[in-house]
Image: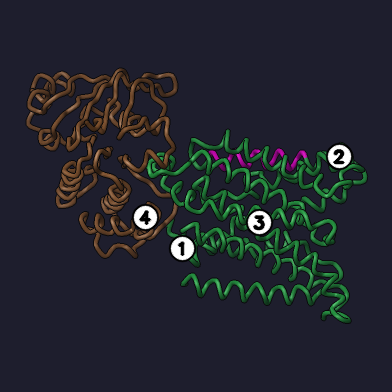
Chain colours: A brown, B green
Amino acid sequence: MPDLPLRAGGLGVELAGRRIIDGVSIRAEHCQTIALVGPNGAGKTTLLRALAGLIASTGELHVADHDPRLVSAETAARSRAYCAQKPTCAWDYRVGDLGEIVGDSESFATWLAELGLEGFADRRLTELSGGEQKAAHLAMTFAALAEPYGGVLLLDEPAAALDLSRREAVRRAIRSFAQAGAACVVATHDLGFARDCDQVIVLAEGRMVASGRPADVLTPEVIASVWGEGSSPAA
Amino acid sequence: MGTTKASVAGLFLLAILVVCALSVGPQGFGWGDGGSLVLLRAPRVLAALAAGLALGIGGAAQQGVFRNPLADPGLTGVFGGALFGIALLLGCSPESAWQRAWFLPAAAFGGALGTSALLALWGTGGSSARLLLTGLGLNAFTAAGTLVIAARSGESRELLTNGAYGDWLGMATFELTWLPVLLCGLAALALLSLSRSLDLLAFGEDAARGFGGDVTGARRRAVLLTALAAAAATCLVGQVAFIGLLAPHLARALVGPRHAKVLPFSALLGAALLLGADTLGRGLWPHAPLSAAAVTAVIGAPLFIWIARRSHA
């Protein structure tokens, strides 16, 4: 039986002496999408970076058959892709350069078209709007995940800066990766999106407050206790 | 401009500059009997080419690794560290410094590596201002150190002062320059292999690692090789500002920001700039030539302001 794409047990992260993530455990099967929700500063970004193996963490971590903290960056990247909430680029590359840099221009061009950036290959990054830039970085991330089956896609608020049609395109992309056998973990404030996922993990102050099926987790009680009284459960 | 067109134009310009550089000097214009003047001038031309190449590609590599268009080994104290290393050796034991060809390059490398390491240690992890301020601090310290040693050591005083003004090319002989020239070439070749890592690093450390880049290894290699390039170039010309800043900016304006193009073009443009500056300084005043560093600054400063004004970043 193939191992789970993503398994983390008692994961902890300390940054500058402060405990940011404390005892988080996640299991994601093939084809599953997990929504990571919680108020600002709950530790969603730190948790995603820890799952990606980009920062030091304690506890058990398996991403696509290996511990990303122990293998080379190249090995880890074959079966795990991560896109930050606000990706940056120091130089004014052409959009098309991004595909060459990530090593798969063809797949990148396909994702570019999916995300509504067809014909943008010759534009400079600085000529793009904030949302278009984010979409280009997402296309780069999607193109980077060369082996979706059993792989892990980690996205930090992928749709936050995007317009409606691109939001829908990102949802389709996540669904297609899940259908191809990947496990997707998506940090989001969009509880509507979270309700469509297979699992929801509610994070507050670095700890898992609740986790499980959306209907069991996103109850008015949990929402009120995490986001405060008066937060709309319908959000 | 297309890459091919730019390469052809660049190499053509460089060839013309080499011919000009071999033709001018205090002995008058021309190549002498049977090319005797050419042989006499060749070490200087070769030194200027090699040093310019190393300065250009070193600047591009440092800008790439620190993701900062203002990082330039001339501003961030790496050249200063190289000269300080030479000053320390000359100050401590002026006789033994010349006994082996590799003593001075090794001292320069030690100084450059020291400042590079401190820059990476203290200057990174914060804003781009932090990097530049740390570099400026290191630069001021090493410059002051060099001047203190120069003032206290009678025989090396003129030599070190000339070095601080980037006026060493006039001393070039094959015996003195073969090793630094070789090191410039080797450092430049090795830096070319970092182009993919530097492209990935443009997206930040997290993204670079996430896309499979060996960030720590690439950074270590870049710091080491930039120090080597800076040390070798300093042994040839002394301190020259601007080329490490100007060459990569010109290269990006000509061929775009991909490092597979920026690195070689910065090397080419750096070589052309330094050789052009040195030739101009010698050609205009054959008997009291201006230092390459002075001419570089005179040409480079307005050019740099022009680039800054037309960039939209």
Place residue B82 in its image quadrant: top right
Between the C-alphas of marks 3 and 2, the distance is 26 Å
Which residues are drawn in magenta? Answer: B130-145
For label 2, the crowd category at 10 Å Cα-Cα, with few meaning under 14, some 14 to 19 and many 20 or more, is many
Residue in front for this viewpoint, A145 or B307: A145
A11 left or right, relative to A201: right
Residue B54, numbered circle: 3
Amino acid residing under circle 4: Leu
> Residue A154, image x and y in percent?
28, 37
Q: Which residue is mark 1?
A: B256
Question: Taking the image as drawn, is residue A130 in sight?
Answer: no
Q: Earlier in the sequence, mark 2 or mark 1?
A: 2
Measured Cα–Cα span from mark 3 to mark 1: 20 Å
- In the rendered image, the quadrant that contains the N terminus of chain A is top left
Task: Find out whether the residues at labels 3 and 2 contact each other: C-beta distance under 8 Å.
Answer: no
Q: Which residue is disc 2 drawn over?
A: B91
Residue at mark 3: chain:
B
* Amino acid under disc 2: Gly
Residue B133 in magenta?
yes
Give the label, 1 or 4, closer to the camera: 4
